[in-house]
Image (tube, helix red, strand yellow):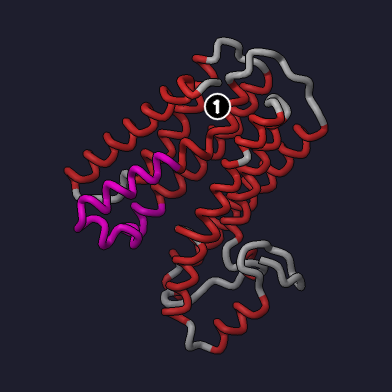
Amino acid sequence: MTQGGLLGPFVLDMAIQLVGFLAASAFKTEKFYDLFGSLSFLTLVWRSLLVGGAALPRHILLTAMVTLWAVRLGTFLVVRVVRTGGDRRFDEALQKPATFFAYWMIQGVWVFVTLLPSMLAMAAPQRSAWLWTDAAGLALWAVGLLTEAVADAQKFAFKMDPKNEGRFITTGLWSLSRHPNYFGEILVWWGTFTVCSSALPAGTAAAASLSPLFVMFLLLRVSGVPILERSADKRWGSEAAYQEYKRRTNCVVPLPGVNFL
């Protein structure tokens, strides 16, 4: 796929974000944000399948992988924001149109970069042989999807229980990691990239690795872990129980007894 071939999906992605921003601004709500994020993923991946011309087995598999992930996460996030009444990330942004607009544009970049390996692989017209790396990538994706879904469900159920108001979760996957959902998310996109890499030339595959690396950078250094860790430290940092929880659990990787990330 050439730079020109990537321009169309990028423009479409940003157009979806712009429509979402305008609708959200008109209604003064953040509740459209995650919905339009998932819509962008679905639109771009299905566009790649239908416009690519040759719906090869790998293309269909990648479309199914992205679709299952986007529908699951999008549904969960929309239900969560409706049930909880809002998303604290946007408390200040809603009062600042330029900041709110930036949130939407950043989401567009996230969608595009994250889907880069899939779009490149689905633009390949030749049928590529299945390799052991495809099975490994699919396994990574499946473990990641399951981990993320279970972690999200466990935390949502915990927060919906009035008895847990003001408390932090230390059960289930959250007893092994402070952010197991992010671990699952990272596995999903490394798995997807691995499946894509078999269909790409070495140089293109190297460029496509920007996708999982970008996801890791966002979650571990920008919008995920740092924000939640600061928020948790502010709420419970003075509690001995929370300090003990931090001491005995990894930040992201849910491995007991292993002091790693």
Q: In the image, residue 66 lies at what x, y percent? A: 56, 34
Given the current orientation, which residue lies at the most extreme top position? 53
Number of dots carrying numbers: 1
Residue identifier under label 1? 119
Quick one: SS at disc 1? helix
Q: Badge 1: how crowded within 10 Å, few (<14), some, or many (20+)? A: many
Q: Nearer the viewer, residue 221 or 175?
A: 221
Q: Quarter-wise, where is residue 20 in the image?
A: top left
Q: Nearer the viewer, residue 166 or 255?
A: 255
Kindly identify the residue that appears in the image at 26 percent across and 62 percent down: 92
With 98 as the anchor, is 128 left or right in this view?
Answer: right
Q: In the image, residue 1 lies at what x, y percent? A: 55, 21
Question: In this picture, which residue range is highlighted in magenta?
Answer: 80-109
Please state, as top left, top right, bottom left or bottom right, where the C terminus lies in the image: bottom right
Q: Quarter-wise, where is residue 162 in the image?
A: bottom left
**Amino acid identity at mark 1:** Met
Given the current orientation, which residue lies at the most extreme left position? 26
Kindly identify the residue that appears in the image at 26 percent across and 57 percent down: 93
Per the picture, the main secondary structure of the magenta-coloured stretch is: helix
Q: Is residue 31 above or below residue 57?
A: below
Q: Is residue 228 magenta?
A: no
Q: Is residue 219 above or below residue 211?
A: below
With 250 as the anchor, is 243 left or right in this view?
Answer: left
Given the current orientation, which residue lies at the most extreme right position? 132
Kindly identify the residue that appears in the image at 71 percent across and 44 percent down: 140
Q: In the image, residue 9 lies at what x, y percent? A: 43, 26
Q: In the image, residue 152 lies at what x, y percent? A: 53, 56
Q: Is residue 233 above or below residue 157?
A: below
Kindly identify the residue that appears in the image at 67 percent across and 23 percent down: 58
